[in-house]
Amino acid sequence: MVLIKRSGLAAVFMLFIVALLVPGAWADEKKVFPALEAPAGSPGAGHNAEGIEHYNQGHWDVAAKHFQAAAKADDKLAQARYNLALALDQMGKHKEATEQFDHAAHLAPKDPAIAESPILKGHLKGMKKH
């Protein structure tokens, strides 16, 4: 009986040690906000769609390149700026992300998907403090 208790306790202890050693086992994963589709017929729609594919797979750097190309193809494409900001945020490039969120907000102040975005609001709120 004592052997069973000890082996059970040892198993719990080993699970605890493994959980401590696994990176991120106790950390919350960073929330991934959905990227926005471009309006049909937009000159940047193709690159934006390609960027969304990579973004959804966690290929932040590749997604960012496509979103940059979409924004270059259509400098009024708020969705591309917003999506670029999302990818930059995932890469830890928060200053650049904030700049792109600000640009997107100015391009589409009445688009609720952009204007009411919690991540955009968080970045812009932080920008006003500086």
Image: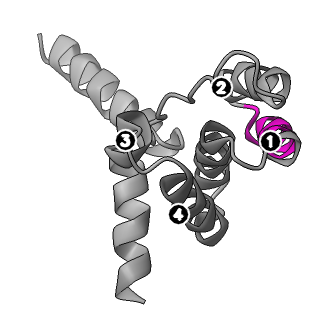
Dot 4 surroundings within 10 Å: few (below 14), some, or many (20 or more)?
A: many
Q: Which residue is mark 3?
A: 28
Residue drawn at 52 percent across, 38 percent down: 22
Residue 23, by quadrant, is: top right
- State yes or no: discs 1 and 4 in contact (Cβ < 8 Å): no
Q: Residue furthest bottom?
A: 130
48 or 5, which lies in front?
A: 48
- State yes or no: discs 3 and 4 in contact (Cβ < 8 Å): no
127 or 24, which lies in front?
A: 127
The disc labelled 3 sits on which kind of residue? Answer: Asp
The disc labelled 1 sits on which kind of residue? Answer: Asp
Q: Which mark is residue 102?
A: 4
Q: Which residue is mark 2?
A: 38
Q: Which residue is mark 1?
A: 74
The disc labelled 4 sits on which kind of residue? Answer: Asp
Left or right: 17 as drawn, with respect to 67:
left
Dot 2 surroundings within 10 Å: few (below 14), some, or many (20 or more)?
A: many
Q: Can see residue 105?
A: yes
Distance from disc 2 to disc 4, alpha carbons, whole Å, reads: 18 Å
Dot 1 surroundings within 10 Å: few (below 14), some, or many (20 or more)?
A: some
Q: Is residue 23 above or below residue 5?
A: below
- State yes or no: discs 1 and 2 in contact (Cβ < 8 Å): yes
78 or 82, which lies in front?
A: 78
Residues in magenta, as a range: 59-70
User: Where residue 31 sits: x, y (%)?
Assistant: 42, 38
Nearer to us: label 3 or label 1: 1
Distance from disc 1 to disc 4, alpha carbons, whole Å, reads: 17 Å
Q: Is residue 110 above or below residue 19?
A: below
